Image (cartoon, helix red, strand yellow):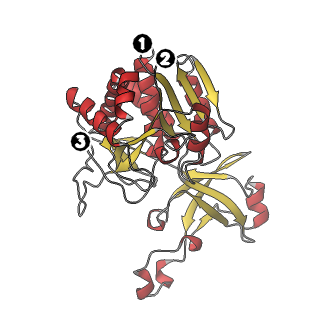
Amino acid sequence: MTKELKLKLKELSLLPGTPSREKLVKQYIEKEIKSDVDELLYDNLGSIIGHKKGNGPKVMIAGHMDEVGLLVTQITKKGFIKFQTLGGWYSQVMLAQVWDIHTDQGVVKAISGSKPPHLISAAKKKEAIKLEDIYLDVGATSKEEAMAFGILPGQMITPAATFIEMKNPKYLVSKAWDNRIGSAVVIEVLKRVKDLELACDFYTGFNVQEEVGIRGAKTSSYVVNPDVAIAVDTGIGNDVPHGDPEEQTLGAGPQIVVYDLGLLPHRGLRNHMIEVAKENKIPYQQASINVGRTDAAMMHLSKDGALGLSICIPTRYMHSHTSMIHTDDFESTVELIVSFLKSFSNETFNQLVKE
């Protein structure tokens, strides 16, 4: 992976953008793709659709722009911040972390806390802290002081994170790989096919509000009405102590998903994607996800339906301040999708839709 591409991954992952607050991510992506598409389309929720015109079936490949985060809901009399989680958070990874509260006056740093362990009984220490028992401490002495900092209900809160290139530089750590890495894949695919004559009509989707119910995927896919709908998202990386690494290993290639809670992938499309991987000697895995779903769950139900598939990049420590990916998986995913687009035509679609 080039230094330039790695820098773009850093920039994209560190941008703040929780569900319904994806504006900065949207602006970044618009700038990145506007010269690579024939037109930009939008839905009314804020999703972006890049269209590279072609003669053939409509193929929509999408990542989502939002990340898991928090929303300010209340400021206590003592100046502590109560919040609503946006997306799936596990309380054990939230404690004693640094957070950014995004106000009109700038970013305010906060620390997540709960009752001190010294005051918790031995029996209770064995239980996970309840989300409602966690608060944010901004170093204020009163509600009035916190409000003077610029804090108000409804504001976005994101993990205060850094981008880390590990000693083995193929391992990258940052916040929001779910799903800025999927968005980055779609951006890179578009750049690699922009000068090709494809036998399909190619739409790139960058959806909003995935983490709170795959909402943007519904509206953006209604704009496109795709024949083929493929979501690129993060998947489970479980090649860790006490984990099961089978089909869940970082560096072993993208996961061509067999099943998730929102999609039974189209058998013909999934088999075709596997054949593309084999023919081009691209490593891949076949994962099953029984907790969670991707944007493909909604995209494949647009209007009269589409052939649906999820492709995931294995990720360790998802939905935290420090998730980890492998650059080989990024490259393999881009290569797989580019090869798929080169192979896809009306003839291919007509064969698959019968299966």
- The three-letter amino acid code for the residue at tag 3 is Ala
Quadrant containing the C terminus in the rendered view: top left
Q: Residue at x 55, y 29 (%)?
A: 29
- Of the numbered discs 3 and 1, the one sitting upstream in the chain is 1
- In this figure, which residue is indicated by the disc labeled 1? 197
The residue that label 3 is drawn on is 252
Image point (25%, 39%), residue name:
284
Q: Which numbered disc, 3 or 1, marks the residue closer to the eye?
A: 1
In primary-sequence order, the first of circles 2 and 3 is 2
Amino acid bearing label 1? Glu
x, y percentage for residue 130? 52, 74
Percent position (x, y) of residue 319?
46, 54
Going by the numbered disc 2, the residue's amino acid type is Gly
- State the CA–CA distance, disc 3 to disc 1: 30 Å
Q: Is residue 63 left or right of residue 171?
A: right
Q: Secondary structure at mark 2?
A: loop
Q: Are the residues at dot 1 and dot 2 in contact (C-beta closer than 8 Å)?
A: yes
Q: Nearer the viewer, residue 162 or 175?
A: 175
Which quadrant of the structure image shows residue 194? top left
**Do we see residue 169 in this rendering?**
no
Q: Residues within 10 Å of mark 2 (few under 14, many from 20)?
A: some
Q: Which residue is mark 2?
A: 54
Where is residue 294 drawn, in percent x and y? 46, 48
Q: Secondary structure at mark 1?
A: loop
On screen, 4 above or below 71? above
Q: Where does residue 96 sit, x and y in percent of width and height? A: 49, 64
Picture layout, residue 279 above or below residue 119? above
